[in-house]
Image: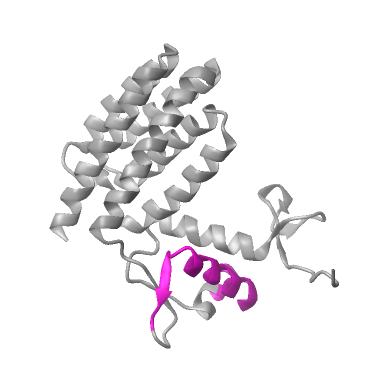
Amino acid sequence: MGRMRREETWPSARQRQGGSIARGGGVALGEAVFRSLCEALQAGSYRAGDRLREEEVAQRLKVSRTPVREALGRLAARGFVEPAGGRGLIVRDLDISEVLELYAMREIMEGAAARLAAEHASTPEVDALRDIEQAFVEASASDAAEMARLNRAFHEAICRAARNRYLDNASRELQDWIALLGPTTFTVTGRPSTSHGEHQAIIDAIAARDGDKAEQLARAHIREALRCRLKLLQKQ
């Protein structure tokens, strides 16, 4: 093998100390930029049709254009962005068939995660789910974006409790695709309250170690999320 190229690195949170960078290894900058862009998609900072230009992203993240080019290449390879002529890349807009396929996979995976969580979740993990749900309730009065963030945290916590690294990795990738869908379904009238009831029932089934019920409830929860998603798409 030839000589390995020395990669720029992005420090982890633990390596940032008072604005300086502590010595030690970090995450490759290309990976850090990629994750930053995925997180921006999830947060709604970028929406379908928005343009992504190397120079602008590099300036915003205060990195060189090389890791940005690498990250944008990865986004394009995964189908999150597409060429916009000579004007950079644009965030893709999923068509209705892709939305249905996405939610079909999400229903399967969330159901499996809930079933496995019912088998493996520790008492502190169940308590953490209840804490997340309480924060969700407190945010439901006015903050749809915060509800969406807490909802992701809720489902990620269930997936971690499932104790299956392959399911966890697949779920993370699916979340990146969900980020392309645009406005959260919590903007649909009544969805926050029905989602809370669904979450609470899932937690209770996991706490009771009832894998069958946990899976059924989780799958029904995603079907209801799809119904609300289709409502949003009809308004566009």
Considering depth in this image, is 26 or 88 the residue closer to the camera?
88
Residue, x 52% and y 28% (percent of image)?
Answer: 162
Q: Is residue 68 inside the magenta stretch?
A: yes
Identify the residue at image location x=53%, y=15%.
123
On the picture, is 168 further left or further right than 189? right
Q: Main secondary structure of the magenta part?
A: helix
Q: Position of residue 144 (x, y in %)?
A: 29, 45
Residue furthest toward the front?
1
Magenta residues span 58-84
Please say whether residue 183 is visible from this viewpoint: no
Classify the position of the C terminus by image quarter.
bottom left
Is residue 149 visible in the rendered image? The answer is yes
Q: Which residue: 55% across, 75% down?
A: 59
Is 190 left or right of 47, judged from the image as shown? Answer: left
Would you place residue 135 above or below residue 23 in this image? above
| Residue name at image x 53 percent, y 27 percent | 161
Q: Compared to 206, does 72 lie above or below?
A: below
In the rendering, at what x and y percent does residue 35 appear?
Answer: 55, 57
> Exactly how many numbered labels are in the figure?
0
Looking at the picture, the colour scheme in use is: one colour
Q: Residue furthest bottom?
A: 86
The front one of 101 and 124 is 101
Image-quadrant location for residue 234: bottom left
x, y percentage for residue 146? 37, 43
Q: Locate the N terminus and report the quarter of the image it occupies.
A: bottom right
Percent x, y for residue 129? 45, 25
Residue 21's image quarter?
bottom right
